[in-house]
Image (cartoon, rainbow, N blue to C red):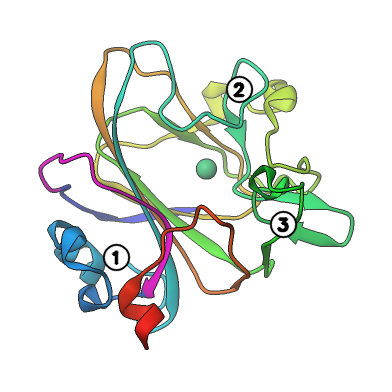
Amino acid sequence: MTSAQKITFPQFSGLRCLMMPYIQGDAASVPDEYQSYADILRSVFLKKGDIGYLTIDESVVVAGTPHRGARAKASRALHTEVGRLPNKIYCWGSGGGWGNKHNVTLDGSVEVLLANNLDDSCALWNATHHDTSVDGDIGHEAARYPYRDAVMMKAGEVHKIGILTPHESLPVKETTARQFLRIISSGVHGREPYFTINPILAAA
Ligand SMILES: [Fe+2]
C-alpha cells in the first residue's frame, strides 16, 4: 500500500463511469465527456499502455453516510475490492443480481489505484484479507480493523491497494460533492452488465 502521487480533481460536474475499459496513460482512449480528467489519466496509471478499468463517481454524499457503501450489510462499509469463492476470485461476487451469475473473474495480481477529493473519507488498512466474503463485504470483521490502525486518505492522494486490501468508505461529516477515482489494472476477465461501454475501444 503506497501513496506517491497527488492529483487535483477537475471541477465537479456529476461525471460518472463504472469500470470503463481504456488504455492506461492514454487520455485519448476515453470519450470526450471525460476529458476534464485528461491530465489525471495521463499521469495516473499502474502500467502505461495496458488495458485498465476506469471508475469516476462524482456525486453528492449526504452527511452521516458513506459515498460508496452500497454493498455494506454491517454498520461499517468495510470491504475488499473483490469477493471470493473457494479457489476463485470474483469481482463483486453476486454478479450484479443477474441470476447470481459470476460474470467476472480477476487475476490475484490485479492492483487498484484510489483517490478522492475529501480528506478522511476513505480508510485503508495495510493488510491482506484472504478470507473475504463472496461479495467482498467484511463489515462483520470490523473489530479486526480499528481506525487507530488505518491510513486515512487525504484529498488528492493516489493510493495503490490490492484486491484483498481492507478499506472503508467513511460517513462524511457534511453533505458534500464528492469525487472518487479508481483505476483497476489489467487482469479482469469478463464484464458485468453495468460496466460502462467505451465506444472508442469497442470500435477498435
Ligand atoms: Fe472499494
Dividing the image into 4 quarters, which one contains the C terminus? bottom left
Kind of residue indicated by mark 3: Tyr
Mark 2 in CB contact with mark 1 (< 8 angstroms): no
Q: Position of 133 compared to 68: left or right?
A: right
Residue 129, image x, y percentages: 72, 45
Picture coordinates of residue 131 (x, y %)? Answer: 81, 44
Q: Few, some or many C-alpha atoms within 10 Å of disc 1 (few <14, some 14-19, many ≥20)?
A: some
In this rendering, the label closer to the viewer, 3 or 1: 3
Find the magenta span and give its range.
Answer: 10-22
Residue 23: percent from the left, percent from the top?
A: 35, 78
User: Residue 149, relative to residue 174: is it above or below?
Assistant: below
Which mark identifies residue 146?
Answer: 2
Q: Which residue is rendered at x = 22% and y = 39% of the image? A: 14
Residue bearing the label numbered 1: 44
Q: Nearer the viewer, mark 3 or mark 2?
A: 3
Please tell me whether mark 2 or mark 1 is closer to you in this view: 1
Q: Work out how far the residue at label 2 is from the one at label 1, CA to CA, in angstroms.
A: 30 Å
Q: Nearer the viewer, residue 152 or 59?
A: 59
